[in-house]
Image: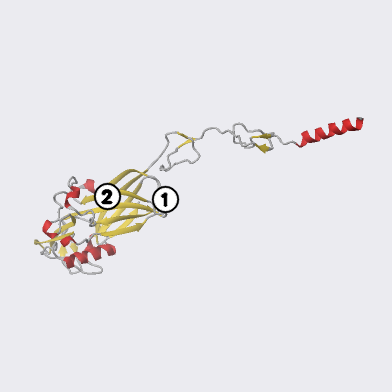
Amino acid sequence: MNKIFLLIITTSFFFLACKKEEGCTDPTATNYNSEATLDNGECNYAPITGCTDSSAINYLATATINDDSCEYLSLNINFKHYVDGSELFANEMIYTNTSNDNYSIQTLRYLISDITLHTNNENETLLDEVHFIDISIDSTLTLNIPQINYQNYTSISFTMGLDSIKNITNLFLNENFFPSFVWPQFLGGGYHYMQLEGDFNSVFNGYTTHTGGTNGVNFSFNKIFQITEITEITEININMEITNWYKNPEILDLTTDGIMEDINKQVILKMNGIEDVFSVNIN
């Protein structure tokens, strides 16, 4: 009888000794149980404060309470203009082209449309549908984007001028380039892409390089440039090398004759523009 009793006590002690205590085994939890050897899945955690907006630069994925600390990407796009690699000086006949003509640049106005940032996973952020640049109006030389979603942007693209979908006269009646930029209706309507004007060889020889959808043909073109990662406040420069409108791959001479009706010259300007008129760099 005593042996049986002893066996029962020994078995009970062994069972209790081998039983694992359940509880929260995560030391970071508020109800951590240092004695527990078996996690019961009921750990409680203190709330984590931080930025909960995934579009912010400092987004914290583990945060459960927004502490109003979110910071957003701000972007300035600057439009820069150069002649032979040097910053443009307007109204000065100090430049010489490949045909040895001395020339000046008095007017430069143009449209850049569909300015877009791209990521590697094909996400796109449209920054501006159409932007009018006039070198005589300082406010048009910078496009400010006060807040955009933070993503790993790897390239920027834009269209010089307006594509055939947008190049319709009545689409931009409230923009500051209307009506001075309207393309003549008998030449297809819509808008100028660019007005580049000045004198060459003498003040009595004026040239007008006006580009647009001559006879309804679309002469706009798209450019895309790789960029480094954009963080916090960034300055992106879209640079125009004016000299290259008139060379590479085709040489286009300055002339007192207008070129708005000349499809061949519009084709040359488009080819030259695609080649190397534009470049992009980030400050």
The amino acid type, in three-letter code, at marker 1 is: Asn
> Which residue bears the numbered disc 2?
129
Image mark for residue 218: none
Q: Nearer the viewer, residue 224 or 124?
A: 124
Q: Secondary structure at mark 1?
A: loop
Q: Given this view, does label 1 or label 2 mark the residue nearer the observer?
A: 2
Task: State the scheme by which the image is colored.
Answer: secondary structure
Identity of the residue drawn at 16% across and 48% down: 178
Q: Relative to residue 279, is residue 69 depicted above or below?
A: above
Q: Relative to 140, is 41 above or below?
A: above
Q: Which residue is mark 1?
A: 152
Q: Is residue 266 above or below residue 189?
A: below
Foreground residue among 196 and 265: 265
Residue at the far left: name it. Answer: 204
Element type at mark 2: strand
The percent position of residue 27, horizontal first and vertical second, equals 62, 36
Please name the amino acid that badge 2 sits on.
Answer: Glu
- Does residue 143 appear left or right of residue 123 in this picture? left
**206 relative to 57 in the view: left or right:** left
Q: Position of residue 47 (x, y in %)?
A: 52, 33
| Residue 41 in the image, given as x and y percentages of width and height | 61, 37
Q: Nearer the viewer, residue 125 or 111?
A: 125
